[in-house]
Image: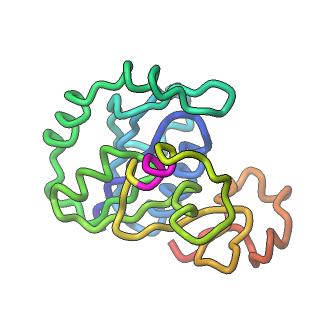
Amino acid sequence: MNILYGVQSTGNGHICRSKEIIESLKKRGHRVQVLLSGKTPNLLPEMKVFEPYSIRRGLTFINKRGRIQYLKTLLQLNFIQFYRDIRDYNASGIDLVITDFEPISSRIARRHGIPSIGISHQSAFEYDIPMAKGNPIGRYILKNFAPADHMVGLHWHHFDQPILPPVIPDCFEKDRPDDVAGYPHPSFPHL
């Protein structure tokens, strides 16, 4: 299968989680093209697993003490480049788009009618789980930032919803608990 895998490269765990899933997909024979957007990641040796990859500006939030700074965020966004990146991406031959809260790949899927899956912590909030009330703008962004046909939420607890445990890198295997909030084992053997 040819997969476009979009990764939000803001450093909030998206790269680490996606690295594990992409490695697993490639080991199973899938061809994976990676699209990184947001802050430019440090091109460290572990970035090799993402090859072939491309980097786009995407949409990045400005945060201060864990809160989105809406005005500062709005002032630094480049919507023209964002839409060019969507329009100009050659999606021929792509069978599936997976997005880890990455908005360009999400919209490439919509534009070309390619099935899409969202895999992220943010996707867990599509389900009936406890969450802070927040504000309407934050809830709107959470729901519409990187939409997908199917959402796979990742959270430390499932809240009796179809939510999976977080993806924990193999290098921490010895540190993994046997049971995390009712999950049998926090891995993705089915990928």
Left or right: where 156 falls relative to 61: right
184 is higher (above) or lower (below) than 129: below
Task: Say how many tags the image has.
Answer: 0
Front-most of residues 110 and 50: 110
In the rendered view of the protein, which quadrant contains the N terminus?
A: bottom left
Residue 44 horizontal/vertical position (percent): 55, 29
Who's the residue at 59% across and 56% down the image?
A: 121
Front-most of residues 133 and 128: 133
Residue 42 horizontal/vertical position (percent): 53, 25
Specify start and end residues of the magenta stretch as a single range. Answer: 139-143
185 is higher (above) or lower (below) than 60: below
Front-most of residues 60 and 95: 60
Who's the residue at 20% across and 37% down the image?
A: 83
Who's the residue at 58% across and 77% down the image?
A: 162
101 is higher (above) or lower (below) than 180: above
- Write down the quadrant of residue 58 in the picture: top left
Magenta-drawn stretch, dominant element (helix, strand or loop): helix
Front-most of residues 188 and 125: 125
Who's the residue at 20% across and 28% down the image?
A: 80
12 is higher (above) or lower (below) than 78: below
- Scheme of colours in the image: rainbow
Residue 90 horizontal/vertical position (percent): 15, 46
Left or right: where 90 falls relative to 29: left
